[in-house]
Amino acid sequence: MCAFMFVSFDSGFGRGLFGVFLMRLRGPGSGWGLVVVSAAALLLLAAIALALALILTRESKQHLHIVVKRDLTRAAVKKCRGSCGGVLTDSEGTFSSPNHPGSYPPNSLCVWVIRVTPPSLVQIRISSLTVEGPSPCLFDWLEISLDIPLSCRFCGNVAPPTINTNSSTVWVTFHSDGSIAGNGFSAQYRAVAPGHKSCSREEFICDGGRCLLPASVCDGHPNCHDQADEANCSHKHRECGGKKVGPYGYVESPNHPRPYPHQQLCIWQISVEEGHIITLSFRNFSLETQDVCEFDYVEVHDSVSTGAGRVLGRFCGTTFPPDLTSSGPHMTVVFVADEGVADSGFNATYQAVSVLGECLQRQWLCDGWNDCPDDMAFKFSVFSLFTSNMKPASSCELIEVEMCQGLSYNLTSFPNIWLSISDQREAATLLRQYRVLMELACFEPLQRLVCGMFLPQCSAQGGVLQPCRSVCSSAERQCSQALDLFSFSWPFNCHLLPDSQDPMECSLP
């Protein structure tokens, strides 16, 4: 038996095994039992050979995956070299978008590969973020990807909390399209030991290293697996607003300049001495961006409460509202935030201005806006015109946006304080999204509505007129079903518009 085995293996693995099998068949006294045993041995050895082949193939594929990923990393870094991106291997460092803190260029693609020495893990803190938004970040974004199939994408104006990863290698990608740009981002990274994850002082830590912004704590929405962020919330004072008296002061959103909490309703009632009016100036302003200010917004009333007097404007997004002036000694400022996106909020200062014996600043005269309660600025400008024989300056301008020409009026005024639009060029850009609906039979009433809101009628009495509520209701009645076919929900809240047919109070485009 040993001789048989020696001869068979010496003459080659497959051929030797076959030789043993034949010799055992030819030997004296061989039976079917030996045949079965030999066949089983042959099958077992064949299975072992197949398993070895599969293992070698798998290792080859894994090696190919590593090579491809390495080549992709090198290609991405090579493409970005000289402008942005790169491989960061120090134990700590910084990186930022191109030109930061200036505006980043269009069509940017930057890839950073952060590698720290295992078993250390990568921790990233984004100290500033101003990237075109809003969520889900389809145009410009900052994306952090780990070796496992997990990534986080950021945009907007609120920097995310500290990111504690579970990896020694992290990919960071910054992308921008060809249009709107912001100031980008600035970030820091460092290597931390697996058991030493941390958050910044104002952040909340849970789940063994997950960091939350203050606005996400006690907001009614559990973010931690153990719901620790919603525990012991009875002490949190969520009210805001109040009465403001005196010749000057300020109002600001809760937590400013950090993100404001969700579900806020803040009402400030500002009062100054009789014979004075109030000027309100915004120093910082960054709220959730919307076409119509319906979710998060600041609304200013020319009265002692929200139920009386005219509304000076409703504002959202990131465009600073213009300076606002009351017609008397009272002004009410309302801040509303829903349960969704939160931003850094706003800060505004107010000041009392005397109207006894004098009017307002000279640059406010003859600007088309009635800033004085008894039209003193208007009377002064009329007197100056007659005495100096000069043509009055006007804030009205001809409508140049082609889509909105041919309305019942041809004069508008900017900035658009209702939608925070700076000029006609910006309005034209925003109106392009509605051109896809031109083929609808109801496009005409929809056109009158959106033009009336984006390019409001310039009033002869000063300021602008919003579309009447009937214009919005008529367009909604005729178009809402057609929009459903395109999976578009009705984008306007008609109840926010004046419920009147008086051409002095609202417009009928």
Image: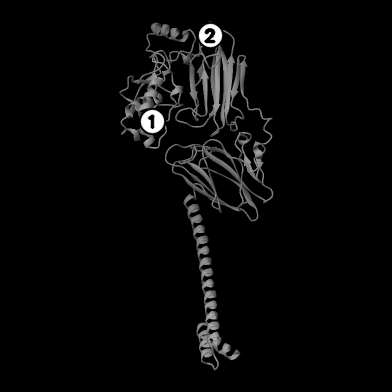
Give the left or right position of residue 416, taking residue 403 as reference: right
Circle 2 packing at 10 Å, graded few (<14), some (14-19), many (20+), is some
Residue 286 on image: x %, y %: 53, 30
Q: Nearer the viewer, mark 2 or mark 1?
A: 1
The quadrant of the picture occupied by the C terminus is top left
Q: Are marks 2 and 1 in contact (CB under 8 Å)?
A: no
Disc 2 target residue: 355
Disc 1 target residue: 480
Q: Against 486, is 11 above or below? A: below
Quadrant of the image occupied by residue 432: top left
Sequence order check: which comes first, mark 2 or mark 1? 2
Residue at screen point 50% across, 63% down: 64
Q: Secondary structure at mark 2?
A: loop
Q: Amino acid at mark 1?
A: Ser
Circle 1 packing at 10 Å, graded few (<14), some (14-19), many (20+), is some
Q: CA distance from mark 2 to mark 1?
A: 49 Å
Total labels drawn: 2
Q: Viewer-proximal residue, 328 or 84?
A: 328
The quadrant of the picture occupied by the N terminus is bottom right
- Residue 209 visible, this orientation: yes
Residue 132 on image: x %, y %: 48, 37
Quadrant of the image occupied by residue 177: top left
Quadrant of the image occupied by residue 412: top left
Q: Viewer-proximal residue, 154 or 239?
A: 239
Q: Viewer-proximal residue, 295 or 61?
A: 295
Residue 182's mark? none
Q: Amino acid at mark 2?
A: Val
